[in-house]
Amino acid sequence: MVNLVSIEKLEKQVEDLMEQRDELEENCDTLPQCKDENGCSSCDIYTKIEKIDNKIEEIEEQIEKIMSEDE
Ligand SMILES: [Zn+2]
């Protein structure tokens, strides 16, 4: 049986991370250095966004794993 409770929990985590990501992205857009094409390579906010992206990916892998264990 699929562990729906833990999937829901993980999906909630993804949602929260997405929200944080959106906020960071908004801040990032207001930085003068980020208006340049590669400006974000030196931008702290972008580093944080990348970390959140990795986290989201990890959680999504966990969700997939839980789903596949049902088969
Ligand atoms: Zn940036």
Image: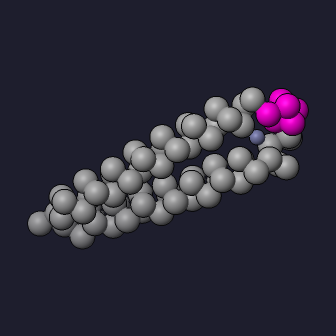
- Ligand 1 placement by image quarter: top right
67 left or right, relative to 3: right
Rendered location of residue 42, percent (x, y): 85, 49
Point out the stretch of residues depicted in magenta. Answer: 31-36
44 left or right, relative to 32: left
Q: Is residue 45 magenta?
A: no
Total numbered circles? 0
Rendered location of residue 13, percent (x, y): 38, 54
Residue 27 lies in what quarter of the image? top right
- Quarter of the figure that contains the N terminus: bottom left
Rendered location of residue 21, percent (x, y): 56, 43
20 left or right, relative to 36: left
Residue at 49 percent across and 55 percent down: it is 56
Magenta stretch: dominant secondary structure = helix
Q: Is residue 32 magenta?
A: yes
Vertical placement of residue 42 versus 39, above or below? below
Residue 37 visible in the picture = no
Residue 40 visible in the picture = yes
